[in-house]
């Protein structure tokens, strides 16, 4: 297949991961005989069944069919597709290199550019030139050495670029800022891209630069009323205060950050009947021996082989209740069972990653707040931390999460629920009102001093962790529930949960969040307000940038 043909497929179907894309290319070449770009227009909807989901199939047909195709014929061709689930697979991380990019922005080379150049407001982008020659000397050295830009150099460069933009357009919109930031980051990712300390890209990579550029535009135009006119926002639906919504369909947020959300091929040597027999065997085993049977090798193997069967139930619509899932897959409600499932789903050992991150990154977070003029609530927590007699390992992790919640102005009970040290599953379910979305129940005199843990979902205790396990194990099970059971982040804790995801667990999809609530409570006033649709939670990006800048300044 020609390289131009492959590039066209990547442009039209960016959602496909590498394995799915390779399988599609092999199908088009080996089975259909496609060799060149012109052949794409000859592919029919029936040719793609079993290889692309309906929405992606429609997009393929729409992109490559001749424009003169009769509208009725096209409708008939597309309407024959089966009504399958339409959740998209997670995007592949964009690979950026510090190559020499063209100074002039391409007018129609990229998806955003093509949209922008077609509108009068952003037509200037097609001939806009980024002022590379005005880049500060220290910043030039950073780009040559593939080093991070220092905060002051980054701010200076932002002003230079925005001034150049304003010469073409008095009030560049958000989309224009994103397009220009994308080109800057594409040319010098090591210097400008949003990345964690492991060098992994955070989200789309250019989110914070684009946001800073737009803020600069608004600052320059703060007294220019004529250039600040905005279109009225459309109304949005209200949602449950806890963000608990019964879904009647699957969306991209369900597969968000997953690499194996819904496998389609049965394990070798297995069929539906054999998988059901394995499920029944494990259910009977659990009834006879309890959760300790999860350590048996045959349970591990059966859970692995029935993973596809488990996902079939977990991804069904409407979703089954936690009680129904537990009845069918009881070992999924053990630490080992959930952790193994999470690893197949995301490729990450959630317990190992949580333990390492809470210790190393937890200490950095505490150090940051100790030296960054904390407010009274944070000062009080730091004092409580200093006086606590809890084991250092758990205390560090708990304190780090609590400090983040206070920074984001999120209430403790949106993640943590405090219970008596001697409380049991039955007493907690009887005496406490447990919310629908997951909570980490802390058994102790205070949240910071807790030494035992449970996790609740849908108003009941779903996990009782063994007493020898630490806070890292508890947090990993709590966090894993959102992914394994397709649960969206509760809006009152969405910033903290996304930071745990991106900073601690290093799950970094390019765009979107696992919280789609349209409304929420204002962190300042407590009033119900509309939530902005953001590619990444802006509070998370701001904190990570401040943490990095603080650590750089500490080295001076």
Image (cartoon, rainbow, N blue to C red):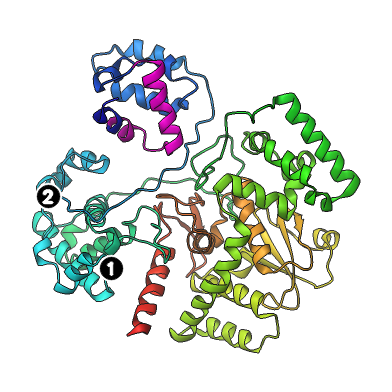
Q: Residue 223 in magenta?
A: no
34 relative position to 380: left or right: left
Look at the image and tell me in which quarter the N terminus lies.
top left
Q: Position of residue 152 (x, y in %)?
A: 24, 76
Q: Which residue is farthest right?
A: 288
Q: Residue 16 in magenta?
A: yes
User: Between residues 30 and 512, which one lies in front from this camera angle?
Assistant: 30
Dividing the picture into quadrants, the one containing residue 163 is bottom left
Q: Position of residue 257 (x, y in %)?
A: 50, 48
Q: With respect to residue 45, does 398 lie above or below?
A: below
Q: Position of residue 505 (x, y in %)?
A: 53, 59
User: Between residues 246 and 38, which one lies in front from this camera angle?
Assistant: 38
Q: Which residues are magenta?
A: 8-33
390 relative position to 412: left or right: right
Chain-order first, disc 1 or disc 2: 2
Structural distance between the alpha carbons of marks 1 and 2: 24 Å
Indicate which disc residue 11 carries: none
Measuring 16% from the left and 62% from the top, which residue is drawn there?
161
Q: How many marks?
A: 2
To which residue does mark 2 refer? 104
């Amino acid at each position: 297949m020609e390289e131009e043909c492959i590039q066209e497929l990547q442009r039209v179907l960016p959602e496909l991961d590498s394995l799915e894309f390779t399988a599609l290319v092999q199908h088009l070449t080996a089975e259909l005989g496609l060799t060149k770009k012109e052949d794409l227009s000859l592919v029919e909807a029936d040719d793609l069944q079993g290889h692309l989901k309906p929405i992606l199939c429609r997009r393929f047909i729409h992109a490559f069919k001749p424009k003169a195709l009769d509208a009725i014929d096209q409708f008939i061709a597309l309407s024959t597709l089966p009504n399958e689930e339409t959740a998209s697979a997670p995007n592949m991380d964009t690979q950026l290199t510090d190559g020499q990019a063209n100074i002039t922005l391409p007018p129609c080379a990229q998806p955003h550019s093509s949209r922008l150049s077609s509108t009068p407001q952003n037509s200037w982008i097609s001939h806009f030139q980024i002022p590379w020659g005005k880049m500060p000397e220290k910043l030039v050295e950073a780009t040559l050495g593939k080093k991070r830009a220092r905060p002051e150099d980054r701010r200076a460069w932002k002003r230079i670029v925005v001034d150049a933009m304003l010469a073409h357009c008095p009030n560049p919109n958000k989309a224009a800022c994103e397009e220009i930031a994308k080109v800057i980051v594409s040319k010098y990712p090591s210097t400008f891209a949003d990345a964690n300390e492991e060098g992994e890209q955070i989200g789309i990579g250019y989110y914070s630069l684009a946001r800073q550029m737009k803020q600069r535009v608004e600052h320059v135009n703060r007294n220019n009323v004529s250039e600040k006119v905005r279109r009225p926002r459309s109304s949005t639906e209200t949602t449950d205060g806890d963000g608990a919504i019964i879904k009647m369909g699957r969306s991209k947020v369900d597969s968000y950050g997953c690499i194996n959300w819904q496998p389609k091929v049965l394990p070798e040597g297995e069929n539906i009947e054999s998988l059901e027999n394995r499920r029944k065997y494990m259910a009977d085993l659990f009834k006879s021996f309890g959760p300790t049977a999860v350590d048996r090798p045959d349970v591990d193997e059966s859970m692995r082989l029935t993973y596809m069967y488990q996902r079939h139930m977990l991804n069904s619509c409407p979703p089954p209740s936690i009680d129904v899932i537990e009845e069918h897959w009881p070992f999924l409600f053990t630490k080992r069972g959930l952790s193994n499932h999470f690893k197949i789903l995301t490729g990450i050992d959630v317990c190992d990653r949580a333990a390492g991150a809470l210790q190393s990154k937890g200490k950095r977070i505490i150090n940051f707040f100790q030296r960054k003029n904390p407010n009274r609530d944070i000062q009080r927590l730091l004092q409580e931390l200093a006086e606590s007699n809890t084991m250092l390992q758990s205390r560090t992790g708990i304190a780090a999460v609590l400090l983040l919640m206070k920074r984001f102005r999120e209430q403790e009970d949106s993640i943590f629920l405090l219970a008596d040290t001697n409380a049991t599953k039955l007493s907690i379910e009887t005496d406490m009102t447990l919310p629908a979305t997951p909570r980490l129940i802390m058994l102790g005199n205070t949240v910071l001093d807790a030494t035992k843990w449970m996790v609740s979902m849908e108003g009941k205790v779903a996990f009782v962790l063994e007493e020898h396990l630490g806070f890292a194990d508890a947090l990993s099970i709590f966090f894993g529930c959102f992914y394994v059971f397709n649960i969206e982040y509760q809006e009152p804790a969405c910033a903290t949960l996304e930071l745990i995801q991106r900073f601690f667990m290093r799950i970094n999809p390019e765009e979107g969040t696992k919280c789609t609530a349209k409304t929420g409570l204002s962190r300042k006033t407590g009033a119900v307000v509309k939530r902005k649709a953001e590619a990444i939670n802006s509070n998370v990006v701001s904190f990570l940038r401040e943490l990095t800048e603080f650590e750089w300044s500490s080295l001076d």
